[in-house]
Image: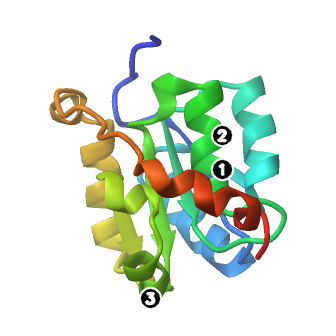
Amino acid sequence: MPTRRPSKHSRILLVDDEQDILDILSRTLEMAGYDVNLASNGRMALEMVAAREYDLIITNIRMPVMNGVAFYRMLCNSFPHMASRVILCTGDIAYLTTQPSPGNAGVPVILKPFQLRNVLEIVAWQLSSEHDRVPALPLAPNLENLLPSATQP
């Protein structure tokens, strides 16, 4: 398993279909000293992860092409060392409470609208050595039931 780099200058992948969210998060994280790459959906993000190592991924849940739940599941299957390096982001609280998702399995969730300082705190914690000591919880077993529809917006 690759080791994590120090939190500043860490490489972060942002995955969201909303350009405004990508813009504000990337600017904020870059000003805090992080190296940021952008993807507009889960399929594009998987291709980027296959080509480059990331210290952290922040992904929206509801996106076209491949949503965040399907992305997380495929990421864990293909790159298991990345399972504890993901933060979910969503404005759909109802989805989180009614559907099995990685957020139900202990993956941190940032709710939209968000405070930028809170995002920076969660990112710093996810990249910290203290976080490495907290084991990633397994994904809810019934998540597979979502996968056929999870690639839809």
Residue at 73%, 46% in the rendered image: 45
User: Can I make out residue 31 in this image?
Assistant: no
Q: Give the x, y percent position of residue 69.
A: 59, 58
Q: Give the x, y percent position of residue 22.
A: 65, 68
Q: Which residue is mark 2?
A: 74
Q: Which residue is mark 1?
A: 71
Give the total number of marks visible in the rendering. Answer: 3
Residue nearer the viewer, 13 or 117 = 13
- The type of residue carrying mark 1 is Phe
Q: Give the position of the N terminus as an image quadrant.
A: top left
Quick check: marks 3 and 1 in contact, CB under 8 Å?
Answer: no
- Position of 78 with respect to 137 (left or right) is right
Q: Which residue is mark 3?
A: 94
Q: Residues within 10 Å of mark 3 (few under 14, many from 20)?
A: few
Image quadrant assignment for residue 134: top left
Quick check: marks 2 and 1 in contact, CB under 8 Å?
Answer: yes
Of the residues under marks 3 and 1, which one precedes in the sequence?
Answer: 1
Quick check: marks 3 and 2 in contact, CB under 8 Å?
Answer: no
Q: CA distance from mark 2 to mark 1?
A: 5 Å
Q: Secondary structure at mark 1?
A: helix
- The type of residue carrying mark 2 is Met
Residue nearer the viewer, 85 or 30 = 85
Residue nearer the viewer, 39 or 74 = 74
Residue at 45%, 35% in the rendered image: 83
